[in-house]
């Protein structure tokens, strides 16, 4: 998997706490952006076994939300008792055949008891003077029932699981920069349940073994360890992975108070370390002598162990701390300082797995099934594809909405245009009718003028004859000089005065009231009348 500069989360789950570190930068300039921890829910984690993944996931989700992390991509650590570490002697086979051969070896030695699980390996540097025709591989494995709990926690916490890796391997990775600078050094990684020893020659692992002692065995008063208050109950180290020697039980010593180092357990650990160094000296006589020990642990209570081993083994012992570089905020730097800051070492080592410029000699294992590995580049491609599909869908939806809106707008505009055309047509017809009436009146006036009727003076005479309490609604004059006046009056007296006014006019003769009618309006009455007359100088036409 290609390394990335994107931030990554390292998550260390143990029986005491859930610890999270957000790391960014490169291998040579790793920077802790955030670090926080939360107590493990009571009863959820017992002896490195996860009993209630849902409770752990809920606590982890709440911790990530409070940290306000910038990523959900995570490397999760597997507790030391849940991961199996072995160095296997294998025949020389091709890289394609290596996995099948290792799977056969695991089945032969019944390392995975339930015959289900996941393993990963790293081909080790060929030992100096090793047997002909063989090679060695560092193998880690875990049973499926263990891995499923971690995957369930990651899924419920909303994490993008990049890898599942043993926590002791992560602590070795954190200690590697100090070991790399030495011609030959011993890296001692200690978790709560187990310890592992790696002797490094010029950056390459030459010897790797596990010791059945952990922080719970080394610190007094812990119920999780097998040494609490009595001496002589220290378990012996496991078989050397690159040799077989028997251990001698340590001498009995009284246990200190709770929280302090148990001398019998510490003595047993020092004995196992010395045996590893002696074995390495015999197997690699031309290799530089081991004179320094690099101690890496996520148990803050083991901080005094560095000075204790220095006195017991008469060797320089360096304590590994989480990476603190320039640019880290003061609050974060204070969190990472020993001894309390040691608890974040495992989480930091997990996150360092994906940093660019990661040295090839450092083991990098992944116990997530290959089909379930979350490759960040593949995830980015999937996200980009998803975003592209969403954008395309949004464009289609926007296009459909725009089309519907445009169609609706076009329909509305067509309706408006049709309505406007109808209104204009109605106005045109009205204006045409009005123009036609005006034209008819003009034609009539012209005809009357041609026949010699002084129409303006006639109208003046009619207007002068009308009583002030009356009004004209229509006047008509035919070519025979017959005049008809239609009007309205408020009283019959006003109508009679209008009739008399026309009778006394010098322009009219034979003036008569043809008819009238009256009707009540607004507490009064309205008299409608029609008066006919003949212009002076015209000959009336006889009625048929």
Image (cartoon, grey):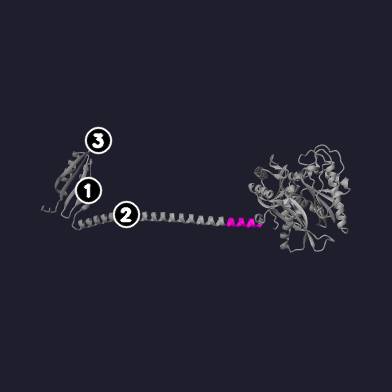
Q: Which residue is mark 1?
A: 474
Q: Position of residue 15 (x, y in %)?
A: 72, 43
**Is residue 477 found left or right of 372 in the rendered image?**
left
Secondary structure beneath disc 3?
Answer: loop
- Crowding near the residue tagged with mark 2, few <14, some 14–19, many ≥20 C-alpha atoms within 10 Å: few
Instruction: Work out whether residue 240 can be spotted.
Output: yes
Q: Position of residue 58 (x, y in %)?
A: 65, 43
Q: Which mark, residue 91?
A: none
User: 138 or 380: nearer the eye?
Assistant: 138
405 falls in the magenta region: no
Q: Residue at x 85, y 55 (%)?
A: 184
Q: Are marks 3 and 1 in contact (CB under 8 Å)?
A: no
385 falls in the magenta region: yes
- Crowding near the residue tagged with mark 3, few <14, some 14–19, many ≥20 C-alpha atoms within 10 Å: few
Secondary structure of the magenta portion, mostly? Answer: helix
| Alpha carbons under labels 2 and 1: distance apart | 26 Å
Which mark lies nearer to you, 3 or 1? 3
User: 345 or 425: nearer the eye?
Assistant: 345
Q: Quadrant of residue 431?
A: bottom left
Q: Which residue is mark 3?
A: 523
Instruction: Work out whether residue 357 can be spotted.
Output: no
Secondary structure beneath disc 2?
Answer: helix
Q: State which region is magenta.
A: 377-388
**Is residue 361 found left or right of 466 in the rendered image?**
right
Q: Which residue is mark 2?
A: 426
């Amino acid at each position: 998997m290609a390394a990335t500069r994107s931030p990554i989360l390292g998550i260390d789950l143990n029986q005491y706490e859930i610890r999270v570190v957000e790391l960014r930068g490169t291998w040579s300039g790793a920077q802790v952006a955030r670090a926080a921890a939360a107590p493990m829910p009571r009863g959820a984690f017992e002896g490195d076994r996860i009993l209630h993944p849902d409770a752990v996931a809920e606590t982890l989700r709440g911790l990530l939300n409070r940290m306000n992390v910038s990523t959900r991509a995570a490397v999760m650590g597997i507790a030391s008792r849940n991961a199996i570490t072995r160095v296997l002697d294998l025949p020389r086979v091709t890289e394609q055949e290596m996995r099948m051969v290792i799977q056969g070896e695991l089945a032969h030695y019944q390392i995975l008891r339930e015959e289900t699980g996941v393993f990963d390996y790293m081909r080790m540097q060929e030992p100096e003077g090793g047997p002909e025709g063989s090679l060695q591989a560092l193998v880690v494995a875990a049973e499926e029932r263990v891995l499923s709990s971690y995957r369930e926690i990651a899924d419920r916490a909303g994490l993008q699981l990049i890898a599942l890796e043993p926590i002791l391997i992560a602590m070795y990775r954190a200690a590697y920069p100090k070991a790399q600078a030495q011609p030959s050094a011993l890296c001692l990684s200690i978790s709560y349940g187990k310890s592992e020893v790696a002797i490094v020659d010029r950056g390459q692992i030459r010897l790797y073994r596990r010791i059945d002692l952990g922080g719970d065995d080394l610190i007094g008063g812990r119920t999780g360890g097998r040494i609490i208050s009595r001496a002589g109950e220290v378990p012996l180290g496991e078989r050397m992975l690159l040799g077989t020697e028997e251990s001698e039980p340590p001498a009995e010593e009284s246990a200190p108070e709770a929280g302090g180092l148990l001398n019998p357990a510490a003595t047993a650990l020092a004995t196992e370390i010395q045996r590893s160094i002696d074995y390495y000296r015999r197997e690699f006589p031309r290799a530089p002598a081991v004179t320094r020990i690099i101690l890496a642990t996520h148990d803050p209570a083991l901080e005094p162990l560095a000075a204790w081993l220095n006195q017991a083994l008469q060797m320089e012992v360096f304590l590994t701390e989480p990476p603190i570089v320039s640019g880290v905020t003061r609050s974060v730097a204070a969190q990472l300082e020993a001894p309390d800051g040691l608890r974040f070492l495992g989480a930091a080592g997990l996150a360092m797995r994906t940093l660019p410029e990661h040295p090839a000699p450092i083991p990098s294992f992944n116990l997530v099934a290959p089909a379930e590995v979350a490759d960040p580049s593949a995830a980015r491609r999937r996200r980009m594809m998803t975003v592209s599909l969403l954008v395309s869908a949004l464009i289609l939806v926007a296009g459909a909405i725009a089309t519907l809106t445009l169609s609706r707008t076009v329909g509305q505009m067509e309706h408006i245009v049709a309505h406007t055309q109808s209104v204009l047509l109605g106005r045109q017809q009205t204006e045409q009718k009005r123009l036609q009436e005006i034209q008819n009146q003009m034609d009539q006036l012209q005809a009357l003028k041609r026949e010699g009727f002084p129409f303006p003076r006639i109208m003046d005479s009619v207007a002068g004859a009308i009583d002030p309490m009356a009004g004209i609604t229509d006047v008509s004059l035919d070519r025979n000089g017959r005049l008809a006046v239609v009007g309205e009056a408020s009283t019959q007296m006003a109508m009679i005065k209008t009739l008399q006014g026309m009778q006394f006019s010098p322009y009219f003769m034979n003036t008569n009231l043809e008819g009238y009618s009256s009707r009540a309006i607004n507490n009064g009455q309205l008299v409608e009348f029609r008066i006919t007359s003949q212009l002076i100088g015209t000959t009336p036409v006889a009625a048929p």
